[in-house]
Image: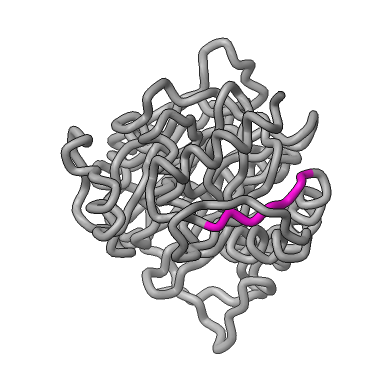
Amino acid sequence: MPRVTLQTLADYARHVLAAAESAAERYPVTATVRLPRLDLTAHLNDGALADAVGQGFIPAPDNQPTVGKCRIFVADPAIEGIAAPATWGQAEYTHHGFATQLAEAGLRGSYFHDLDFWQFYDPERRVGAQLMRSADGFPPWEQGAPLRAFLHWEYAARGMRLTHAGTLGIDGKGVLLAGAGGAGKSGTVVAGLLNGLDSIGDDYVLIDTDKGVTAHPLFSTLKQDPEGFARLQLKPRLKSHGPLNWQGKYPFHIDDIAARAVPASLDIVALVVPHISGGEKSSILPVSRKDAMIALAPSGIAQMPGERESGFRFFGELTRQLPCYRLSLGTRPEEIAGTISAFLARGIS
């Protein structure tokens, strides 16, 4: 099996991109989805990832203009002309060194060593390749937000950013919910959806700061751990849900619990950091921009390979543009939703 080093990385990336693209007619599945300002076409093999691509996105409205198109080839050796993935051949592997070496060649990419799982993207040509050992040789998080890294690189090249955050809103205005895993983002989003609020996602959303701060939906999957699933009484409300995922959470789709169609966007009026306080009632109080940045940036940058410096600049500017608050969460879903609704109503009026 060939071994890749920093010195041969760019050449290997170009080789993988060329091989994956040259096999375009031999992929069993081709799926195209209309996303905010982007038409995404994915070529891939049958299997769970193809199902996730087919079901895991929230399509953009037909009347929303498309600015560009990108093509992603999800390759594995079962596809004629695709070789098995190489492995990393140096003792030391660092995400920063990997990303820097590719950036110097005008490319983006990532590598997950446990699976020899490679992703490469050419932002100028808007072509990407994901190379796996088999059709199901992807990391467990890939199904919940399929092709996330490629969308991150594509949108970052156009001045937008995938952000690890949840959202809640009403009448087109909304808040961005930021925090590390376990902070209460997903539970807060579900509580809001079950009590009349809108959301465009509970994990990753697309942020555009061209004219104010606007959030757009990408992925349709929500998730809850068994405790939250029971507390929010989700089972009788859902048509179906998946088995526990790699995080020990039940995945389901936002359309299954949303009172209305998912909005095409939300105008973000505040950055809110949820906190499980243990108190009975919820409250929203100002928080420092530093604390908001700590809640927002680290997980977003760590989970989005490459673009580290530009990521810190983007999130730093975001916390300067938005007023920042801490949401101390109460225990009752309807009370949490009411607190956020009242907060948004005060901001709108």
Q: Name the residue at 59% across, 86% down.
A: 92
Which percent across, then down, holds residue 101? 71, 67
Q: Main secondary structure of the magenta part?
A: strand
- On the question of residue 181 being in view, the answer is no
Left-right relation of 217 to 142: right
Q: Name the residue at 47% across, 45% down.
A: 336
- Looking at the picture, tell me which residue is in the foreground, 259 or 261: 259
Which percent across, then down, holds residue 37? 62, 26
> In which quadrant of the rendered image does the C terminus lie?
top right
- Is 181 magenta? The answer is no
- Is 323 magenta? The answer is yes
Which percent across, then down, holds residue 259? 37, 24
Q: Name the residue at 61% across, 29% down.
A: 266
Left-right relation of 92 to 225: right
Q: Name the residue at 52% across, 34% down.
A: 217
- Looking at the picture, tell me which residue is in the foreground, 185 or 318: 185
Per the rendered image, the range of residues in magenta is 322-328
- On the question of residue 232 being in view, the answer is yes
User: Image quadrant of residue 50?
Assistant: top left
Left-right relation of 346 to 148: right
Kindly give the residue lying farthest to the front in the view shown.
280
- Looking at the picture, tell me which residue is in the foreground, 195 or 113: 195
45 up-or-down from 62: above or below: below
Which percent across, then down, holds residue 320? 83, 50
323 up-or-down from 268: above or below: below
Left-right relation of 122 to 338: right
